[in-house]
Amino acid sequence: MALKTSITGIFPSDLILRSCIIQALADLRANPWLLEYCFAALPADDLTAADYGDSEVARAREWFQRTNIPVFLNINANEAKFPCITIGLQSSVEVEIEGSLADINADYVEDNDYNWPTLVGPITPTNYNSATGILSFNDNQLSTFIVVSNMFVVDKAGNVYPILKVDDNDIYIPQNTVADFTDLLIKPQRPSYQTALESTIYRESYIIGCYVDSEPIHLVYLHTILIFLLLRYKQAYLEARGF
């Protein structure tokens, strides 16, 4: 069973950043008309329009549509592929002024239902009356345990039955319950634990590299597209995911 928690753990910012760029590239391919906004400065500027106007925007669009652009972490040891985008962590420093010595989190504790402990068992009752729902035990079977109502009986098949009442060595579950209570377990209410939470804030710096092995103008295309993607999608693919 996967642990259910509200926290992000140790935030994998490099992987989040890489997946942001990959998804943004895919969305741009699905909506190539956005490239008109990406390169809008070239035909709008009097000094660049003659050499890098609408025709250059068309070439950039055509290059992007036919070119695969992988995104790597710069620790990748495989053979380089061009063109590509790389991501490298430069620094990761705790922002002490924005934190506290106790690393206090907004929610300082949360329920933890990852593990459901067994309080008693496996244990087999000496008698079970399905009509009354009474499980009877010997004196020594429950003498070392505290069993109260609102706990649960779990049979061998994993079925769960609430304990309605405890009277000496008799445990009451819902009447007319038909089950095999050999080697039953007695468990507490869920969730059974609580986890203390703490948090801190880090300021990280990354270097994002653009590489091509073809014409120099393709590097201009790639750099322009990358900046456009980071600005356009930072709210949806970065901020919304924890940055």
Image: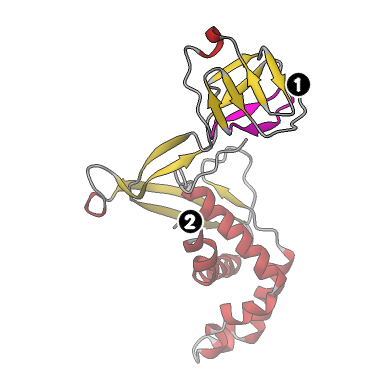
Q: Tell me the kind of residue under disc 1.
A: Asp
Q: Which residue is mark 2?
A: 208
The quarter of the picture where residue 63 lies is: bottom right
Q: Which one is nearer the viewer's eye here, 79 or 110?
A: 110
Question: Which residue is the site of mark 1?
Answer: 180
Work out whether mark 2 precedes mark 1 in sequence or the reverse, and give the earlier one.
1
Residue at (45% x, 43% y) in the render: 9
Residue 74, numbered circle: none
Distance from Cα at disc 2 to Cα at disc 1: 63 Å
Instruction: Residue at 57% x, 77% y: name it.
Output: 38
Secondary structure type for disc 1 = loop
**Residue 198 position within the rendered picture, expressed as x and y whole percent measured from the top left:** 34, 43
**Is residue 192 found left or right of 172 in the rendered image?**
left
Q: Residues within 10 Å of mark 2 (few under 14, many from 20)?
A: some
Tell me where residue 215 sits by quadrant: bottom right
Q: Nearer the viewer, residue 43 or 96?
A: 96
